[in-house]
Image (tube, rainbow, N blue to C red):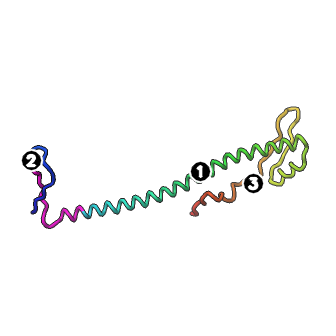
Amino acid sequence: MAVVRLWWDAESYGKLATMQIPKNGLLFWLSNALAAVFLVLVCINFVIASGNRSLQIQVNTRQQYINQSIQLSQLHQQLVSALATIAVKNNNQAIRQILADVGITVSATDKSSGTAPAAAPPASASPPASIPTGAPKAPAH
């Protein structure tokens, strides 16, 4: 067995602490194998973290699209309501026809009640056919 000096012993100043290593190198090869295993695990962790990062970007893009769709939906409802009010108030057949072309029916209410006309949403309200250009498409299952 070989004797290797490692560090100064704190209790006995001036004496070196020693550790004995077997001559066949079992400890050396075992520690190298363990280091290689940890190196492989670090590489796997890096690959998985990179994959998670790209998935997080996709999720954030889709969430932004959903949030913007909600905001635009509210704007769309306000716009349709304003157009319906103008169509009834001014008896404008052109605006009524435009609304009818997209499937929205306008019905006038009693003028004495002072309520706005009701604009019914399209009969077949469906989500947008495609996701905007900047957003990734959902994976097919």
Q: Position of residue 93 (x, y in %)?
A: 90, 48
**Amino acid type shown at disc 1:** Gln
**As rendered, which of 123 and 117 lies closer to the eye?**
117
Q: Which residue has dot 2 on it?
A: 14
Give the mark nearest the N terminus, 1 or 2.
2
Q: Which mark is residue 63?
A: 1
Is there a contact, CB below 8 Å, between mark 3 and mark 2? no
**Amino acid type shown at disc 3:** Ser
In magenta, the rendered stretch is: 14-31
Q: Where is residue 111 in the image (x, y as percent from the top left)?
A: 88, 35
Q: Which residue lies furthest to the bottom in this view?
A: 24
Q: Which residue has dot 3 on it?
A: 124
**Residue in view at x 13 percent, y 56 percent:** 5
Give the mark nearest the N terminus, 3 or 1.
1
Question: Does residue 130 appear left or right of residue 113 in this picture?
Answer: left
Instruction: State which quarter of the image contains the C terminus.
Output: bottom right
Q: Could you say whether the residue bearing mark 2 is in a helix, strand or loop?
A: loop
- Residue count near mark 1 (Cα–Cα under 10 Å), binned few <14, some 14–19, many ≥20: few
Picture quadrant of residue 24: bottom left
State the separation of the CA atoms marked 1 and 2: 67 Å
